[in-house]
Amino acid sequence: MTWKNYILLAFILLITEQVGGQALSSNFDQLEDYYRRAQLLGNITPDYSFVAYPLFPVEAFGVADPHKPDSTMKRFFIRDDKNLFENQLPSGLSLELLPLVWNNQYNTHHPEDWNDGAMIPSKGYQTFVSGGLFFKFTLQDDLPSLSVKLQPEYVYAANQEYDGFPLTRENPELATLRWAQYYFHTLNYIDQPERFGEDAYSRFYWGQSSIRVNYKSISLGFSNENLWWGPGRRNSLLMTNTAPGFRHFTLNTTSPIRTPVGSFEGQIVLGKLIASGYPPPNTGVKDHNGMLFYSPKRQDDRYFNGMLLNYSPLWVEGLHLGLIRSFQMYKIDMDNSFNAYLPIFSPFSQKRIEKQAGETEEGELNNYQKRDAYYSFFMRYVWPKAHVEIYAEYGFADNHWDRRDFTVEMEHSRAYNFGFRKLIELRSTEDEVIQVGMEITHLAKNPVSVIRGAQNVYQQGSKTWYTGVGVRQGYTHRGQLLGAGIGPGSNLLSLNAGWNKGLKAIGIQLERYAHNEDFHNETVKDVRMHWVDLAAALNGSWDYKNLLFSLNLKFVGAKNYQWIYDFNPDEYWDNSRGTDVFNFHGKLGIMYRF
């Protein structure tokens, strides 16, 4: 039996569970973290991995309402206004109101933060509103159920003009050189606009809407929900909620599938990615011969295929091991073969991939050269007795040539994310804890990748993470990243500590964020000119009856903003000559749970 058959078998094996219910969106940070902390405290079985979102708390944890995990919650009104027409609907049909969510944020100098779904990177005020209805139809418990979730989202952003990559410099030749480097290294290979148009931004999305058929531990459906794959909390390599949700067909587990060798969880996705429609900045810049640096990208829709598979061994409680793969290519370039629609089952080595592709005419690209591929391995270990979790993800932005290449140059195109969290129980009450945590994300190229050279469609060079050669929109949807929100070639160190009691939390977060180190190391090449943000944030959440509040106040000092540093040979280490700016990022969220 091949590894493909084992993956399919893991999705076919079923256990008896209750019928499917609501999914908890990956945009509800406070609720997600509540369940994850509950596992560390021993209140949720450690065989659930917390590596695939949205969560299904009803199926996985046995809660009655995923948005109200605290059974002691008081209400504003005595009447239960969540279940509509409770006594007027046919038997087996239920209709519920989903939480009403209103998020607001403000940036004083330049766009800041990520993992905010449909919201865009922008300066000034921005607001987000979401709400909806959840329908479920069940004939009887041992038959599949049908669920429909209508949860649209609306975003408005002032989208104010701000100082981005500098249009001019004191040295005009240097300004032209920097724009050439920026385009040929990054901007021509990713759809990540500096600004989403010149006016205020306003959009309606389908948001977290979905239609699903649920049976036992399996759910099959069509969805626009945000996904999150991987064990990371601040970042994940291949799938986060930094971009808006994209339309996709999904086959996924809603709770672990238990077998004699352990439990399995997973998801297979087939979807469509859309370009932003906005150009990069300063598209008219030219060299001295009048040649444009900007190379327009194709605006065709892209096909996306991804997979997550998690295995939790029976013999090591709390250990979760897994694999994530993702592929994208322009839909118009696809043929009708199995490997075109389900490349997640294709070989890992480039040698076997090209052998499978067969012969092509000289100068013509095959399916495998036209697509963009990523994969990662991850682990998460939960130790409830010590109230500790540790996790790591190690990924690749390219396939190795063969096993020997993988062995000799394992770090080719690699990136990683790892972290831990420790909860310290306070004696006053059962669920009151102090938590400390750390997470490190590293996307910048290492020496192996730099020596290997730049990637193109004909050779196995090394590309900057999330940029694309065959697909020049890069790893994006509607102009925002599918992966780690820190962006191409960037690194992040995040430290956090805080107090938690149920859904109440007060904490601090300290971060060091190095922007696009690949661009700096391969083009700027000046040790004084790294663009580094040092940030301190106060964050908290508080529940009061049906309401759940969240607040984030982030103070960011950007060193050498946009890699700007004035040269002075006589004062080589005079850091005061860098362009340093301050940005305040404030975010206030309010959720009303019916």
Image (cartoon, helix red, strand yellow):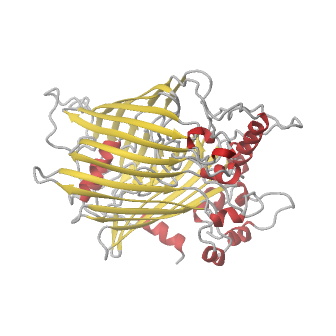
Residue 384, position in %: x, y?
A: 24, 64
Residue 449, position in %: x, y?
A: 65, 63
Name the residue at 60% across, 77% down: 407
112 left or right of 400? left
Image vertical order of residue 387 relative to residue 497, above or below: below
Q: Residue furthest toward the left?
A: 428
Of 527 and 162, nearer the camera is 527
Of 8 and 154, nearer the camera is 154
Image vertical order of residue 368 relative to residue 586, above or below: below
Name the residue at 47% across, 53% down: 236
Q: Is residue 403 visible?
A: yes
206 left or right of 294? left
346 left or right of 54? right
Residue 542, position in %: x, y?
A: 24, 36
Residue 574, position in %: x, y?
A: 58, 44
Q: Residue furthest toward the front?
A: 570
Please identify the quadrant where the C terminus is shown. Answer: top left
Of 41 and 175, nearer the camera is 175
Image vertical order of residue 282 relative to residue 257, above or below: above
42 left or right of 359? left
Q: Is residue 253 visible?
A: no
Tell me where residue 98 sits by quadrant: top left
Tell me where residue 274 sits by quadrant: top right
Q: Residue furthest toward the right?
A: 289
Tell me where residue 584 sits by quadrant: top left
How many marks the image carries: the answer is 0
